[in-house]
Amino acid sequence: MTYLRKLSFVASSLVILATAPAIAGDAANGEKLFKRCAACHSTDAGVNKVGPSLAGAVNRECGTVDGYKYGKGYLAACEKGFVADEAFLTEYLKDPSEKLSEVAGSKQRSKMTFKLKKDDEIADVIEYLKTK
C-alpha cells in the first residue's frame, strides 16, 4: 500500500470512529434508568413537566418543544443552533451547564441539574429515547 493510500485509509477510519457512538445502548435498561428522569420529563408528546417532553428528543432541533419555556442558558445555546443528536445528548447528560456553555461560547446555566455520570447509562437512556 502506498503512503497516500495508507494515509487516506487512516483518515477515513478516524472519521468513522469520531462519528460512531462510543457505546451501543440497551433501550430496555434505558427505560428503567429513565424513571430517575420521569420526575421532570415525560416521553409523551405534548406533556411538559419541569423539563420539556422528550418524545422525539433524539435529533430534535434546539428549543422546538411547543408550550415549553426554555431557560436562558438553553436559549443562549439555541442562538448558535444545534440539534440534540446522540453526540450532543451524550455530553449534555454528563453535565448540562457545561455543554450549553460550550455550545453558546460563554458561561451558561441549565435548568437541568441532574447528571448521568456513567457512559453505559447515558447510552442506554439515549437508546430508550430513540424509541419515543
Image: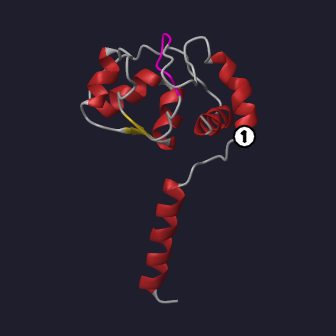
Report the predominant secondary structure element of the magenta stretch.
loop
Q: Quadrant of residue 108?
A: top left
Q: Residue furthest bottom?
A: 2
Nearer-the-camera pick, 78 or 7:
78
> Which residue lies at the image location 37% right of the left edge and 27% below the top edge?
100
Magenta region, residue range: 49-54
Query: Image height check: is 55 above or below 23?
Result: above
> Which residue lies at the image location 51% right of the left edge and 62% below the top edge?
16
Residue type, mark 1 in image: Asp
Which quadrant is the C terminus positioned in?
top right
- Whether residue 111 sits left or right of residue 26 in the image: it is left
> Which residue lies at the image location 63% right of the left edge and 32% below the top edge?
125
Q: Give coordinates of residue 106: x percent, y percent.
A: 27, 25
For the residue carrying disc 1, how many other residues have a C-alpha within 10 Å: few (<14), some (14-19), or many (20+)? Answer: some
Query: Image height check: is 87 above or below 11?
Result: above
Nearer-the-camera pick, 69 or 44:
44
Mark 1 residue element: loop
> Which residue lies at the image location 35% right of the left edge and 14% below the top edge?
69
Q: Residue furthest left?
A: 79
Return the residue at label 1: 26
- Whether residue 40 sits left or right of residue 52 in the image: it is right
Query: Image height check: is 62 above or below 17?
Result: above
- Whether residue 25 sits left or right of residue 73 in the image: it is right
Q: Give coordinates of residue 80: x percent, y percent.
A: 25, 35
Q: Give coordinates of residue 43: x percent, y percent.
A: 58, 25
